[in-house]
Each structure stands twice: as structure tokens, then as C-alpha cells.
Image (cartoon, helix red, strand yellow):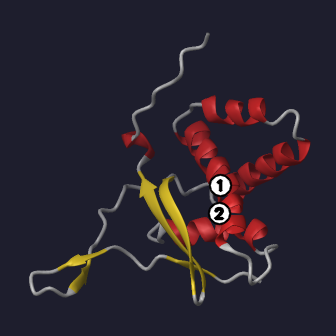
Amino acid sequence: MLSIFAHQGSCRPGYNGKQQNMAKPKMKGVPHRKISETFLDFAAPLLNDLPGDAPEIPARNALIVCFTAWNAVIFSDVLKDDYFVDEVQRLTPGRPEAAVLLEQMMTRKRKLFGKDARLIGNWEVTRTHDGINLHAEAIDPYSVKRNRPDPS
């Protein structure tokens, strides 16, 4: 099984030159758990199928699917904007396995992580000597400016 670790928080140099943990501002109505830990739990069905010595690329590919499903659900259920759910369905008709996988992950988000209204922003996977490390950014969905392509 692949070992994956959530990022342990943000740090910055303090006045004395030592690293200090920075407390992130709390968004109203979100869990107190780090988004990277939650994201790993959400992605576990895909990540657990990877071999323990898998390079970071297969983990990154699995997380791309999970990121897409998670954020599509947040836009749909929290912001009442079905654009991204519709895009997922529009882009996968010729790939039934991808369509089923994304639908399963969107269902998983709603059933097991439905109360977590954070968007997942920038995220990064790196290989360490202990396994794979994940750093992810939580974003308040109401703070996101949405630009849509012009329908032509």
C-alpha cells in the first residue's frame, strides 16, 4: 500500500529566525481538520489500489480525479452552480470507465464528506523517503470569482 502523508501546516520565519506555525483563519462552518487530511481520506479508494512503491505520478493522476469530483460537488451543492458537474458529464461520454469513476467519487463526496464545504485549491504531491506527501489549500467557495467561457 502507498504511504501518503498530509502536509503538517504552514510555517514562516519568526523574528528570531526560527520557524513558527501560522494559524490559518477559520472559515465559518467548516471542519477543523486540515483539508489535506480530508482530501486523503476522500481519495483513499483510489490511492489504496496503488502499489507501495508507486511513483508520485500515479498518485497525482488519482488525485486529479478526486480533485475534480470534490470541487464539482462543492460548486453544485454549495454554490448551486452545476456548470462543473455538467462539464464532467460532457467530457466523459466516450469514456464510460472515467464517467463511472467520477460519478462514484461525487457520490462519495456527498455521502461521506457532505458537510465539508471547502473547495480544494492548489495542491501538490511530492515523493519523500517515507512515501508520498500531499499539501493542499482550502478555499472558501464564496470567495471564488467565477468566469465562464462564452457559449458559442
Query: Residue 90: x and y, percent?
Result: 76, 29
Please name the amino acid that badge 1 sits on. Ile
Please name the amino acid that badge 2 sits on. Arg
Observer-nearest residue: 151 or 35? Answer: 151
Observer-nearest residue: 152 or 48? Answer: 152
Classify residue 11 as left or right of residue 132.
Answer: left
Q: In this view, which residue lies farthest toward the left?
A: 15
Q: Are marks 2 and 1 in contact (CB under 8 Å)?
A: yes
Q: Residue at x 59, y 89 (%)?
A: 130
Residue 3 is drawn in which quadrant?
bottom right
Q: Residue at x 57, y 45 (%)?
A: 74
Q: Residue at x 62, y 70 (%)?
A: 40
Query: Residue 27: x and y, percent?
Result: 36, 56
Where is the C terminus found, in terms of image quarters? top right
Q: CA distance from mark 2 to mark 1?
A: 6 Å
Residue of label 1: 64
Residue 116 against residue 16 in the figure, above or below: above
Residue of label 2: 60
Residue 87 is drawn in which quadrant?
top right
Residue 37 appears anywhere in the view? yes
Q: Residues within 10 Å of mark 2 (few under 14, many from 20)?
A: some
Classify residue 70 as left or right of residue 94.
Answer: left
Q: Residue at x 43, y 80 (%)?
A: 8
Residue 82 appears anywhere in the view? no
Instruction: Give the mark count.
Output: 2
Element on which disc 2 rests: helix
